[in-house]
Image (cartoon, helix red, strand yellow):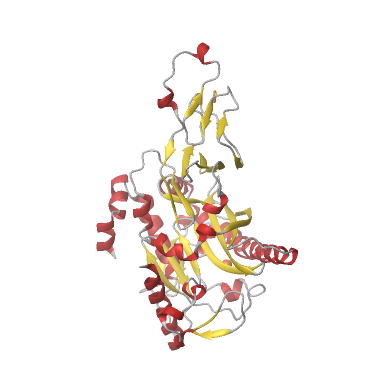
Amino acid sequence: MSREELVAMTRNLIEHGAADTMEYADEVVRVPASSYTDPDLYEQERRNIFRRLPLMVAPSCELPEPGDYKAMDICGIPLLLTRQRDGSVAAFLNMCSHRGNPVASGSGNASRFTCGYHGWTFKNDGALLGVASAKDFGTVDKAALCLKRFPSYESAGLIWATLDLESKLPIADYLSGYDALLSAFGFEGWTLFSQRTIPGPNWKTAYDGYLDFYHLPVLHKDTFGADFYNRANYFFWGPHQRLSAPSKMATRVGSDIEEDLSLLSDDEIPNDALLSGVWTIFPHVSIASFYGGGQRGAMISQLFPGETVDESFTTQFYVMENQPETDEQVKSAHEQFDFLEVVVRDEDYSTGKRQHQALQSGMLKEVLFGKNERGGQVFHQWVDKLTHASDTELLDIFTPEQREAAE
Ligand code: FES
Ligand SMILES: [Fe+2]
């Protein structure tokens, strides 16, 4: 039962907070600087991580209605997501079975897609509906020429797809039970308030910034403040991890009143405290709660490698429990969202770009992850392991029995 697991983590944070301690990693870990800058390794990561593992491609609220669709390009793979008539989501290779032209672009609502090249038509469940000038074209086996379907999975108000048509890795196994905890956010019923995409540095340089609180009072002193707590305990489910500050005190989202959580029974611990901190989904998503527009919101940051080793792109989805109603609330939600863009773009990513440029000099052989930066240590270990795993090893790593044995 996921609430029990959430409560157990919260108790861990309360106890460490009360004792003024944190959980340390065993050692300081060294990561070769070339792992951020080597173009060959980068290509391997694009292929073996992004084109082989399940990716969180959209929050469910981006495609709430039957007929909603979104086309994306992820590491060179054209993807089309559709919400079908029965309410389920499907993920297709966005390539016409005639000669490969993408059948959709952007996003919108449509029950069918007509290819813009010669006019073949597909239903949003992928079926080939019509061949233009069929009597001239010759015989076609329509059933064999539907859009090719990627494995996809919707859970906890989030949508995953694996950009490998042959993938045998069950997405639920890959998530290692993590989605059951993410479901405590209740994203199934939330709405998408706004979204934007911002450029960033190398994808791992960018992602590192979501995995430690160590930098918060330094890099973000002008935005979050210089007294922001810089410690975090880490919790892991396979490669997915949550980090949260050890503390017995908490304020409910949207309130200034501090509560001593150690005085509350398990049932009394508010959901906000159970979900505090940053929830990351390997290899490229980070989720954190915020408050703006008079209610609960969350920023879902979804990061993809760019064309070259030194660039990435992050789509920030600002999702809210309900759409803000008054002009005042809309303004306040925009302000919250804009603030987060400034923090990430002007502080995290601009630092990441400078850092990456310096690393590209090759003058520093290794970078360090301290005992207090366990999240980064574990992230780089997983990237390394999964980049170099064979397809068979990949399946073994995520079979539930293997996973349990490894934990
Ligand atoms: S490529 Fe789509 S109809 Fe020809
Ligand atoms: Fe940051």
Quadrant for the N terminus, please: bottom left
Could you say where residue 375 lies in the image, as x and y percent from the top left? 44, 67
Residue 116 image-quadrant placement: top right
Front position in the image: 384 or 327: 327
Q: Is residue 2 left or right of residue 359?
A: left
Q: Where is ligand 1, by quadrant?
A: top right
Q: Nearer the viewer, residue 110 or 347?
A: 110
Q: Considering only vertical position in the picture, is 284 above or below 13?
A: above
Task: Tell me which residue sits at (55%, 53%) in the image.
Answer: 61
- Judged from this view, the residue extending furthest toward the right is 327
Quadrant of res 163: top left
The residue at 64%/60% (across/down) is 323
Tell me if residue 114 comes above or below residue 139 in the rendering: below
Whether residue 354 is situated above or below residue 26 in the rendered picture: above
Q: Kindly indicate the quadrant of the structure image that contains residue 381.
A: bottom left
Please provide percent x and percent y for residue 107.
60, 42
Residue 248 in percent (x, y) is at 48, 84
Judging depth in this view, the residue of 222 and 405 nearest the camera is 405
Quarter of the image that includes the C terminus: bottom left
* Residue 300 image point, x, y percent: 55, 59
